[in-house]
Amino acid sequence: RPVWTACALVLANLIATDLFAWIFTLAECEHLAAAAPSGRVRVVVLSDPQLTDRTSYGFLPPGPLLSAVMLLSDAYMARASLMARALHPDVIIFLGDLIDGARSYSGDELDAGMKRFERVFHFPQSLRVL
């Protein structure tokens, strides 16, 4: 029982620390956006987001563990997208691969991957995304 209690405390600490870091960073992004001079174009660059998929980890067979890894990866990317939106950019530029294994996707898989990408990053239609 002490081992499970220690694991639960470590996990709770990790979650709380991660949440605090994201909240602090979000507040800082909003502060920076409010302080930016008007009349300038605000550009945010997101480098190499690479959504995790079935090709990301060869040692993970399709199943619940891979689904959990993808869900956690999507949640992390969605929070990064929230930070980017908090800066109120005029343009967002993506650099690098958007989806890890997209080069080996069929047409239907690519469509599903892009829908997932749009769901995770969820940028408003008014925002220019390159």
Image (spheres, grey):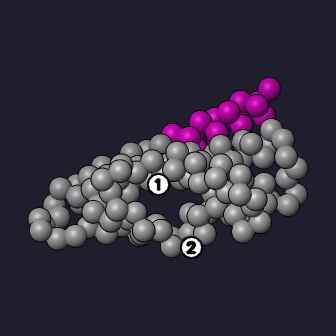
Q: Residue at x 56, y 45 (%)?
A: 75
Closest to the observer, 10 or 71: 71
Q: Is residue 105 left or right of residue 17?
A: right
Spot occupied by residue 21 in the image (x, y as percentages of width and height): 44, 50
Q: Residue at x 22, y 70 (%)?
A: 41
Closest to the observer, 3 or 111: 111
Spot occupied by residue 19 in the image (x, y as percentages of width and height): 47, 43
Q: Is residue 81 left or right of residue 110?
A: left
- The extreme bottom residue here reads 96
Q: Nearer the viewer, mark 2 or mark 1?
A: 2
**Badge 1: how crowded within 10 Å, few (<14), some, or many (20+)?**
some
Q: CA distance from mark 2 to mark 1?
A: 16 Å
State the residue position of label 1: 80
Specify whether residue 6 is painted magenta: yes
Q: Quadrant of the C terminus?
A: bottom left
Q: Tell me the SS state at disc 1.
A: helix
State the residue position of label 2: 96
Q: Does label 2 or label 1 sit earlier along the sequence?
A: 1
Q: Which image quarter: residue 63? A: top right
Q: Quadrant of the N terminus?
A: top right
Q: Which residues are magenta?
A: 1-16
Specify whether residue 101 is painted magenta: no
Q: Tell me the SS state at disc 2.
A: loop
